[in-house]
């Protein structure tokens, strides 16, 4: 039986509105409009450059070697004798140490998130999707874990496990400890996202189209939760950096002579009467870095919020 | 006696069962959190059949359970009790891969054109998803089929790379229809498929659904609260109240000779786009409000609002069974069916 | 001689967005007499809600009333100062909205919310307001009004919430009540009750009403006169019987024939309007409806028709007019189909049946 032919030549309702900017493109645009976020982004990029390029700069003699002890100029004030930001109690150049210290801080900040992500994802997705007893079990486990005092746990781990060798190996327990302590937030967030998206019609539609649970989780639930996940991970970076600084301050982080900001703050704190500025610079470095990442995090949160789409 | 059995001719293939879907004594209770063990009795003993090739309309007001029933039928929710027999198989007993196989034959079109499409997937991927799930066709064949499906529902096949938010509500609903048709189902459940659309767009979709039914010999279960739309699209109509079916009848019989007082009141309440008719229309006002599905009234659950109920009496004590009353092929659950 | 309550003259309300200026209300003239019920009909985006909001000067950002006059009992609302307009809103003209759940404050009890509408205008004291609230709830048929006064909105059912909204609207005995899709969110039987209530209120209190809706059946039930809007303009206007029996504008005609009727036995194909509503920041030239009109002629694409008298008290904005359209053209319009038959044929060949 033939269908009635269209009365007009052009099919009805053929046209679609002009291609608008995609979802990520729209988010990027909104991010760009947020000045603080852009400022944060610039700062972080700058830091990354510093971290990556500082060995080169030392090689070309633009800055001093952070390990070199300029015995003649111990506790130099900023500007003296080729030490733009002064030197510490062993004569090592503060600026150089700050720049090298950024390597540690950034590595910790970023890699910890890389560890947290799969853990939080696995637990959050499973709990959220499975529901019922599995959810209950996982969430109680999460609660117990969360109740552990973070710092204490980290201290225990790094005291018990301190490999020697390159700074990277020394960092392993720190990565592990911080990640183990901080995955809870992400897991809870992902679970919450899954719970709210699970009820949406497009998930029902996918189920009735014959999609298997794994596919639902990976192709539908995960992509739609990415926004808040990215924001949480971004905010996690300054948290990790700060925690590492605290550990270094307490002396249980990376051991000297590798420069870290936390250590530098401690040294500066000890020498505060002799050289007041030496604590200020590393503290500023920590503060600015945290602020930069927070601005980015805020900017991302606003940019990725679907309700704020224009 | 061990005589050799004579060779028999192979038994003739059984005629295809005219009933495609049979809901048998289906119950769905949602337990309420907290103590007490109370539940929302969303579907409370429903018997229904959908015949091959027909369009069955399912109507009722809030709390009647029609959406829940739709989800029981498409196995999106498990039944508390009862069975759903689709094409000879009780799908309540199926799990995993076996259930997914049956799903291919029944698809669903959803109410909200904004929420029923994954905002992060392109339209092409959305429509191809069922094909992917059932491993139908190669990549190239799927692309061709998606384009054909878009053309079929009146959309430009050049836009497979666009995202749902770039389309209008009516267009999105058509994408949903294309998706439902992708794997060639025999049964489609339309859950309030046009309720969220503007009048003239809804008309496009209604016409499209009718054309598609004819073209592909589909069976529909059409769920809506708008009886006018349901009457237009359906061959038979079932009316639900508070978790139970109270009447089923042909589309004309139900209007001309309603047997259940609720059906009658419902029909009389519907305004008609004709001022002359409206001036004379005198709606039957039901007293009170729809009772809570947590604690439905005893006996016939409609008795608290029924204009002809004998309560206290049989209506408040005994639940009336769904039985033939009125015209041929008409069922009603009322002790005094048709006696208005 | 009925007294004219509201007179809107050449109203232009526009939205200034990053994508351009949206002409939401593009030269609207209408009037409402005391005691009458005017239906303002059209689909999403036609400007009916913005027209109503303009009357109350509640147009949201980035919208503004750009030109025109809105005369209520002779006084121009657009020129009122802040004090005056606050006096005016809720007092002379009140508005009720579509979704009562979001229009009511969920953390305040119903009684105080309605009281607030009264005490804000200093017409009643707290005591008087309190007793009046119970009266109002009784008048809108909320059962058990005395105790219900202390309930929160979530404790009311949908229908009762809408009644509470109506009570709030009527609290100060406004001369005009604007109702924006008052029954869309409600069940059919509840809708019937609200319609009956509104008819009663119009009869007993003499409140004039502006009923904004896309539901043609609702209009047929409640209104005496209707106005059809499209793309920010009025395209047809007249007494309700005439418009329903003899619509002259193709849009009105299509709208009326795209709605299935519950009392019709025949399964005639519904008329559907092809295409999408126009982009109001970039409307088409000539008649704004022409890209979608089944009866378009060349002239329609060039010049926008004026609103002309087509019958006694009936105006339509069209060069063609339904009475000049042939039977065949009408049949053509009905037959228009979305689904493509060849596509259907091809589809059936590509995939095996799913083992039906």
Image (cartoon, rainbow, N blue to C red):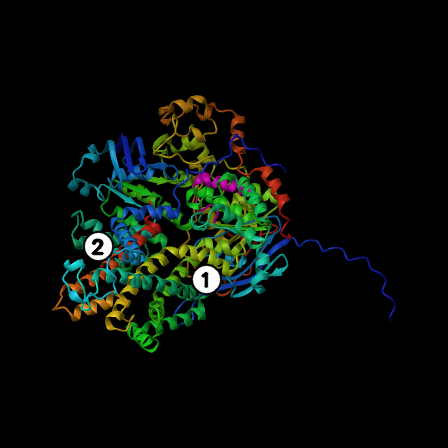
> Which of the 4 image quarters holds residue A52?
bottom left
Query: How far, Cα to Cα, is label 1 from label 2?
Result: 36 Å
Question: Residue under circle 1?
Answer: B311
Question: Residue under circle 2?
Answer: C131
Q: In this view, does C302 lie above or below B215?
A: above
Q: In this rendering, which labeled residue sits more in front, label 1 or label 2?
A: 2
Q: Is residue B204 on the magenta stretch?
A: yes
Outermost residue on the top side: it is C299
Question: What is the magenta range?
Answer: B192-210
Q: Is residue A132 above or below residue C163?
A: below
Q: Is B92 on the left-hand or right-hand side of C302?
A: right
> Could you tell me if the residues under marks 1 and 2 are in contact, i.e. CB atoms within 8 Å?
no
Helix, strand or loop at label 1? It is loop
Q: Is residue B244 above or below residue C197?
A: below
Q: Mark 2 lies on which chain?
A: C
Between C352 and B285, the one lying in front of the other is: C352
């Amino acid at each position: 039986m033939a269908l009635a032919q269209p009365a007009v030549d052009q099919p009805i309702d053929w046209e679609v509105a002009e291609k608008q900017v995609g979802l990520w493109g729209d988010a990027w645009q909104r991010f760009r409009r947020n000045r603080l976020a852009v400022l944060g982004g610039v700062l972080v990029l700058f830091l990354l450059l510093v971290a990556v390029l500082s060995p080169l700069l030392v090689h070309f003699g633009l800055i001093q070697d952070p390990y070199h002890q300029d015995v003649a100029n111990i506790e130099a004030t900023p500007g003296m004798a080729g030490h733009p930001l002064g030197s510490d109690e062993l004569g090592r150049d503060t600026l150089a140490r700050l720049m090298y210290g950024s390597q540690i801080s950034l590595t910790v900040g970023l890699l910890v998130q890389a560890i947290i992500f799969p853990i939080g994802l696995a637990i959050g997705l499973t709990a959220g999707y499975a529901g019922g007893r599995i959810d209950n079990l996982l969430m109680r486990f999460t609660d117990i874990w969360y109740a552990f005092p973070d710092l204490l746990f980290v201290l225990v781990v790094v005291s018990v496990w301190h490999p020697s060798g390159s700074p990277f190996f020394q960092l392993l327990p720190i990565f592990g400890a911080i990640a183990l302590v901080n995955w809870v937030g992400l897991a809870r967030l992902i679970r919450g996202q899954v719970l709210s998206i699970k009820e949406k019609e497009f998930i029902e539609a996918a189920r009735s189209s014959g999609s298997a649970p794994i596919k639902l989780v990976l192709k539908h639930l995960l992509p739609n939760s990415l926004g808040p996940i990215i924001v949480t991970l971004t905010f996690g970076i300054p948290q990790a950096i700060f925690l590492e600084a605290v550990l270094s301050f307490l002396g249980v982080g990376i051991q000297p002579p590798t420069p870290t900001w936390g250590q530098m703050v401690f040294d500066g704190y000890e020498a505060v009467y002799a050289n007041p500025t030496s604590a200020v610079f590393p503290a500023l470095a920590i503060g600015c870095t945290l602020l930069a990442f927070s601005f980015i995090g805020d900017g991302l949160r606003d940019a990725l919020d679907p309700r704020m789409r224009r | 006696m061990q005589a050799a059995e004579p060779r028999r001719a192979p038994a003739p293939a059984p005629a295809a069962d005219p009933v495609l879907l049979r809901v048998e004594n289906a119950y769905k209770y949602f337990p309420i959190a907290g103590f007490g063990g109370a539940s929302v009795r969303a579907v409370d003993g429903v018997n229904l059949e959908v015949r091959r090739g027909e369009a069955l309309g399912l109507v009722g007001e809030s709390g009647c359970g029609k959406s829940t029933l739709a989800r029981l039928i498409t196995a999106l929710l498990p039944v508390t009790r009862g069975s759903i027999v689709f094409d000879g198989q009780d799908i309540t007993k199926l799990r995993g891969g076996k259930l997914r196989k049956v799903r291919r034959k029944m698809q669903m079109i959803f109410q909200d054109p904004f929420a029923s499409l994954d905002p992060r997937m392109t339209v092409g991927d959305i429509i191809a998803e069922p094909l992917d799930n059932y491993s139908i066709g190669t990549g190239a064949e799927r692309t061709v089929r998606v384009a054909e499906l878009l053309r079929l529902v009146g959309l430009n096949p050049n836009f497979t790379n666009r995202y749902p938010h770039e389309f209008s509500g009516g267009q999105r609903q058509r994408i949903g229809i294309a998706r439902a048709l992708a794997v060639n189902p025999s049964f489609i459940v339309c859950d309030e498929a046009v309720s969220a659309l503007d009048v003239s767009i809804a008309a496009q979709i209604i016409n499209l659904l009718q054309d598609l039914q004819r073209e592909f010999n589909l069976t529909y279960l059409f769920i809506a609260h708008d009886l006018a739309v349901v009457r237009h699209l359906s061959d038979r109509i079932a009316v639900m109240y508070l978790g139970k079916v109270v009447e089923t009848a042909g589309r004309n019989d139900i209007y001309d000779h309603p047997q259940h007082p609720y059906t009658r009141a419902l029909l009389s309440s519907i305004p008609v786009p004709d001022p002359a008719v409206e001036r004379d229309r005198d709606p039957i006002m039901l007293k009170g409000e729809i009772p809570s599905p947590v604690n439905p009234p005893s006996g016939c659950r409609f008795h608290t609002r029924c204009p002809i109920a004998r309560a206290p009496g049989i209506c408040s004590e005994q639940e009336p069974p769904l039985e033939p009353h009125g015209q041929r092929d008409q069922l009603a659950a009322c002790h005094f069916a048709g006696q208005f | 001689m009925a007294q004219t309550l509201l007179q809107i003259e050449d109203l232009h309300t526009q939205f200034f967005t990053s994508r351009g200026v949206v002409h939401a209300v593009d030269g609207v003239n209408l009037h409402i007499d005391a005691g009458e019920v005017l239906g303002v009909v059209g689909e999403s985006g036609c400007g009916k809600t913005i027209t109503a909001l303009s009357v109350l000067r509640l147009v949201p950002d980035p919208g503004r009333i750009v030109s025109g006059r809105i005369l209520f009992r002779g006084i121009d609302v657009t020129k009122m100062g802040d004090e005056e307009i606050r006096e005016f809103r809720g007092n002379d003209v009140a508005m009720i909205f579509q979704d009562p759940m979001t229009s009511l404050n969920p953390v305040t009890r119903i009684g105080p919310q309605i009281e607030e509408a009264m005490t804000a205008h200093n017409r009643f004291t707290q005591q008087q307001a309190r007793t009046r609230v119970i009266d109002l709830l009784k008048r809108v048929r909320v059962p058990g009004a005395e105790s219900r006064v202390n309930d929160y909105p979530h404790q009311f059912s949908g229908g009762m919430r809408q009644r509470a909204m109506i009570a709030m609207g009527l609290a100060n005995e406004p001369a005009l009540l604007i109702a924006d899709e008052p029954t869309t969110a409600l069940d059919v039987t509840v809708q019937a009750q609200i319609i009956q209530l509104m008819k009663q209120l119009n009869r007993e209190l003499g409140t004039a009403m502006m009923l904004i809706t896309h539901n043609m059946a609702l209009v047929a039930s409640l209104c005496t006169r209707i106005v059809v809007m499209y793309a920010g303009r009025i395209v047809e206007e007249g007494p309700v019987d005439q418009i329903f029996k003899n619509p002259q504008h193709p849009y009105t005609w299509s709208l009326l024939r795209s709605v299935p009727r519950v009392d019709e036995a025949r399964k005639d194909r519904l008329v559907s309007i092809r295409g999408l509503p126009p982009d109001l920041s970039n409307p088409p030239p000539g008649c704004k409806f022409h890209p979608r009109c089944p009866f378009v002629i060349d002239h329609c694409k060039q010049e926008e028709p004026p609103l002309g008298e087509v019958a006694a008290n009936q105006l339509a904005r069209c060069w063609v007019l339904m009475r000049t359209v042939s039977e065949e053209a009408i049949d053509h319009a009905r037959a228009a189909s979305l689904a493509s038959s060849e596509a259907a044929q091809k589809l059936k060949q590509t995939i095996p049946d799913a083992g039906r």
